[in-house]
Image (cartoon, helix red, strand yellow):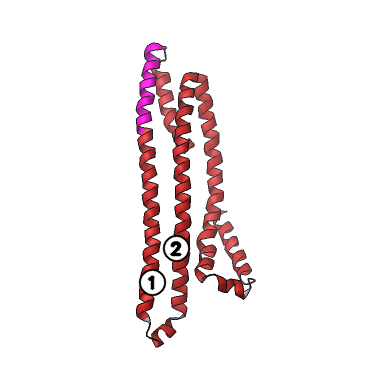
């Protein structure tokens, strides 16, 4: 279904591109159309696939929270507070990555457009001996694209580090709370173990 959907979208988009007026085609570099036909169709289908995954994880998360409520309302409250903070971190990461992805896409469109034009005009480039200027422009386009990708990776890594540190320290806090519950409120070790294991799965679903 995934590959067929992408195939149909690309065929449909190819047909519609032929209907675009010449002045609109000239207003954009060819890299925009290459990007829309290749990467963007894949991103749309990926998005649909992501929705199915989100629904699945949401159902699992609700189930885990219900289980928390049945076993220990106090631990449910503690877990909800942790999830709220965790969600804030992941949400900030998603926004930052989305912004970085837009910059990468624009740089990639620019690079693709330049490569297409260079290939189409390679005879004229040789005739007019302007290889050096095209090489300089190619270096600039490639450097801009790779720079945007590096910025995106650095931004993503920063939030991954923050997220993993948060999970690690709250994991310790969760263990301490469970020990207090066992020592002072009569929680059994078996119940504490179930809650601890379920908490890790809930984080994965929350993300």
> For this rendering, which residue is in front, 112 or 39?
112
Residue located 54% across and 50% down the image: 47
Distance from disc 1 to disc 2, alpha carbons, whole Å, reads: 12 Å
The correct choice, above or below, for 118 with respect to 167 in the image is below
Magenta region = 168-184
| Mark 2: secondary structure | helix
Circle on res. 107: 2
Q: Position of residue 150 (x, y in %)?
A: 36, 56
Classed neighbour count for the residue bearing mark 1: other residues with Cα under 10 Å, few (<14), some (14–19), many (≥20): some
Q: Does the rendering let one see residue 37? A: yes
Q: Position of residue 122 (x, y in %)?
A: 42, 81
Mainly helix, strand or loop, the magenta region? helix
Look at mark 1 in the image and give the residue it sits on. Answer: 138
| Residue 178 inside the magenta-drawn segment | yes
Residue located 43% across and 24% down the image: 195
| Residue 45 inside the magenta-drawn segment | no
In-image side of 135 versus 31 (left or right): left
Residue located 39% across and 76% down the image: 134
């Amino acid at each position: 279904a995934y590959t067929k959907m992408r195939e149909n979208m690309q065929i449909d988009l190819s047909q519609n591109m032929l209907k675009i007026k010449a002045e609109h085609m000239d207003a954009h570099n060819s890299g925009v159309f290459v990007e829309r036909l290749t990467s963007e169709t894949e991103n749309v289908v990926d998005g649909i696939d992501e929705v199915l995954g989100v629904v699945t994880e949401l159902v699992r998360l609700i189930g885990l929270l219900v289980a928390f409520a049945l076993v220990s309302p106090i631990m449910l409250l503690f877990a909800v507070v942790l999830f709220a903070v965790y969600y804030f971190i992941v949400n900030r990461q998603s926004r930052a990555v989305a912004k970085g992805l837009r910059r990468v896409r624009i740089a990639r469109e620019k690079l693709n457009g330049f490569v297409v034009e260079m290939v189409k005009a390679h005879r004229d480039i040789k005739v007019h001996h302007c290889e050096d200027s095209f090489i300089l422009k190619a270096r600039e386009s490639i450097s801009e694209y790779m720079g945007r990708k590096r910025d995106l990776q650095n931004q993503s890594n920063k939030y991954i580090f923050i997220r993993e540190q948060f999970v690690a320290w709250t994991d310790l806090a969760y263990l301490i709370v469970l020990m207090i519950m066992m020592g002072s409120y009569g929680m059994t070790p078996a119940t504490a173990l179930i809650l601890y294991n379920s908490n890790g799965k809930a984080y994965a679903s929350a993300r």
